Amino acid sequence: MSVFSVDKLISEARRIAADYRRATGKTLGGVTGEIAENDAARLLDLELSSDKNSGYDAIGKGKRAGKKIQIKGRAIFDQAKSGQRIGQLKVNQEWDSVVLVLMNEDFEPVEIYEAERTVLMDALDETSDSKRSKRGAMSVSRFKHLARLVWTNADGVIEDGEVWDNRGNA
């Protein structure tokens, strides 16, 4: 067992990633995903999977009990910049929903969205002529449109009755 707690190590990873980006203008590969997984597990009551080839990153506990969840993370450095994308969805593997952790320039979580597999797969099928959708790629704005907001840094976990619908009449 390590003498360092995971929370302390993630805190240091946030600091180093933010300092590195400020110094170089580039991000450290893989760090955003690791931080997002840790944040999603801690904030949404998930248990991280040890099998990275399973198609999902965590199993839900509590109200998400047994649910297989992919976790994606994206640090947003410039709100005005459009076309930011999330990591590729594992469309050919087993999972129930995808959680997207949006972080600020300090790699702190700001919002978390969750979208069900059926909704995402239907959206990818609608644009199946696109090479990106065939690979499971999607923009952050498209994902947010299809998902529901489940956590904010201001309000914490948003219960189902409190969720605002970002999909209009869908």
Image: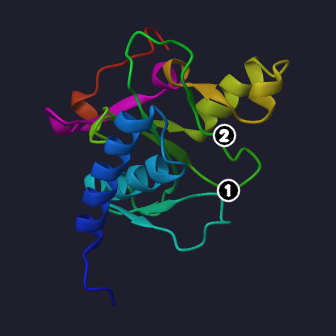
Q: Is residue 157 magenta?
A: yes
Residue 61, how many percent across, how many down?
Answer: 35, 63
Q: Amino acid at mark 1?
A: Glu
Which scheme is used to colour this image of the protein? rainbow
Stretch in magenta = 143-159
Q: Is residue 128 left or right of residue 73?
A: right
Task: Determine the residue located farthest toward the bottom in the rendered image.
Answer: 1
Element under disc 1: loop
The residue beneath circle 2 is 88
Q: Is residue 20 left or right of residue 142?
A: left
Residue 159, how many percent across, how many down?
Answer: 23, 38
Q: Is residue 125 left or right of residue 12?
A: right
Residue 32, how many percent across, how many down?
Answer: 45, 47
Image quadrant where one finds the N terminus: bottom left
- Say which of marks 1 and 2 sits in front: 2
Task: Determine the residue located farthest toward the front in the rendered image.
Answer: 23
Say above or below: 84 vs 70.
above
Q: Amino acid at mark 2?
A: Gln
Instruction: Determine the residue positioned at 46% across, 9% down.
Output: 169
The residue beneath circle 1 is 94
Q: Is residue 76 magenta?
A: no
Q: Residues within 10 Å of mark 1 (few under 14, many from 20)?
A: some
Q: How many marks?
A: 2
